[in-house]
């Protein structure tokens, strides 16, 4: 059996366009060449792919079953050619990006949909680790690029660039004592605060701490589940509140002492001495060009 790509292309084109003559026009070949390629493919496979008894060829049961298999082979060929072209252009075969959940999902979708258009053959892995783990993953080589909230102290091996500001909003359950607002600084200190957990005991863990009574939770989304039961209050990125199905069970009271906007810088980080390929360079430029305020 010696099945060729040309035979599979003729088979797919004839099935898609309804006739051998239409397939010939699409592929820029003579109709006789298409007929010969399909006939030879049927001989090689030992089955009839088309019923030719009518005016136009119609897929047989075998043809219907084998057409998706032919498409897979043709698609893999295109992928093979794309990957090979990437090697010639020194494009990475794989890129790993670690992203803090402060970065809105809508922005993630937009940026990486664009990435997929420009680098369709680069294998992409998106990781969403705990906030302080983003920088560690980049430092340890587990991620090529990171997006995280600003750290007071970064290892000297890492470079960073601020790409946006994420407003934090005071939020609690609708029946919590703080729900009616406006809320004073002293009232915040008297009630339990729910904070995003940090794995280390460094200054990052205490940066936004106000109350003496604190619970530590690793996920903003889980924090919202706790808050709806009026257990405490938290400072949560506004887009997470807006996108949560629990928004109706939550209150966002005003603060007495300011506008209630506590923006946190969102930063892109990468290892200074790590070689940068075209895909990573494009993504860095795309993220730096975004520079929007999420709110």
Image (spheres, rainbow, N blue to C red):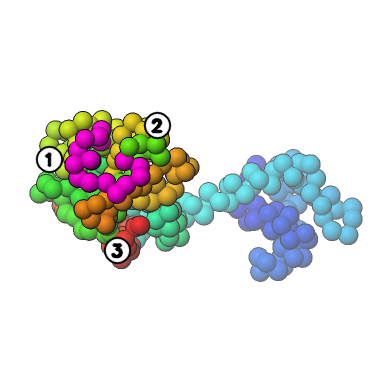
* Residue 77 visible to the viewer: yes
Mark 1 or 3: the one toward you: 1
Is residue 36 shown left or right of residue 222?
right
Quarter of the image for residue 251 reads top left
> Sequence order check: which comes first, mark 3 or mark 2?
2
Mark 3 or 2: the one toward you: 2
Looking at the rendered structure, the secondary structure element under dot 2 is loop
> Sequence order check: which comes first, mark 1 or mark 2?
1
Residue sitting nearer the eye, 48 or 207 = 207
Q: Position of residue 113 (x, y in %)?
A: 45, 56
Measured Cα–Cα span from mark 3 to mark 2 = 36 Å
Crowding at dot 2, Cα within 10 Å, few <14 / some 14-19 / many 20+, comes out as: some
Looking at the rendered structure, the secondary structure element under dot 3 is loop
From the viewer's perspective, is residue 201 above or below residue 96? Answer: above
From the viewer's perspective, is residue 232 above or below residue 235? Answer: above
Residue sitting nearer the eye, 203 or 179 = 179
User: What residue would you read off at disc 1?
Assistant: 203
The residue positioned 39% from the left and 56% from the top of the image is 107
> Sequence order check: which comes first, mark 1 or mark 3?
1
The residue positioned 34% from the left and 57% from the top of the image is 294
Mark 1 or 2: the one toward you: 2
User: What residue would you read off at disc 2?
Assistant: 229
Query: Are the two marked residues, 3 and 2, in contact with CB atoms closer than 8 angstroms?
Result: no
Answer whether residue 190 is magenta in the image. Answer: yes
For the N terminus, give its image quadrant: top right
User: What residue would you read off at disc 3?
Assistant: 291
């Amino acid at each position: 059996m010696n099945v060729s790509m040309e035979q599979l292309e003729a088979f797919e084109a004839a099935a898609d366009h309804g006739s051998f003559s239409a397939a010939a026009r699409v592929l820029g070949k003579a109709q006789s060449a298409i007929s010969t390629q399909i006939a030879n493919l049927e001989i090689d496979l030992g089955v009839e792919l088309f019923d030719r008894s009518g005016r136009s060829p119609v897929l047989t049961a075998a043809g219907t079953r084998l057409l998706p298999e032919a498409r897979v082979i043709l698609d893999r060929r295109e992928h093979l050619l794309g990957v090979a072209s990437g090697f010639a252009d020194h494009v990475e075969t794989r890129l790993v990006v670690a992203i803090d959940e402060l970065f809105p999902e809508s922005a993630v979708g937009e940026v990486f949909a664009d990435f997929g258009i420009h680098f369709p053959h680069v294998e992409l892995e998106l990781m969403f680790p705990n906030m302080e783990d983003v920088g560690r993953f980049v430092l340890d080589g587990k991620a090529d690029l990171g997006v995280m909230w600003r750290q007071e102290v970064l290892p000297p091996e890492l470079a960073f660039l601020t790409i946006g500001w994420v407003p934090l909003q005071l939020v609690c359950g609708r029946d919590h004592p703080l729900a009616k607002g406006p809320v004073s600084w002293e009232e915040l200190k008297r009630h339990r605060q729910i904070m995003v957990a940090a794995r280390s005991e460094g200054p990052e863990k205490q940066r936004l701490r106000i109350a003496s009574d604190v619970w530590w939770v690793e996920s903003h989304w889980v924090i919202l589940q706790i808050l709806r039961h009026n257990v405490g209050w938290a400072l949560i990125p506004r887009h997470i509140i807006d996108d949560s199905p629990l928004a109706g069970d939550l209150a966002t009271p005003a603060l007495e002492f300011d506008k209630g906007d506590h923006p946190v810088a969102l930063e892109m980080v990468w290892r200074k001495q790590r070689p940068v390929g075209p895909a990573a360079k494009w993504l860095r430029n795309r993220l730096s060009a975004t520079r929007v305020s999420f709110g």
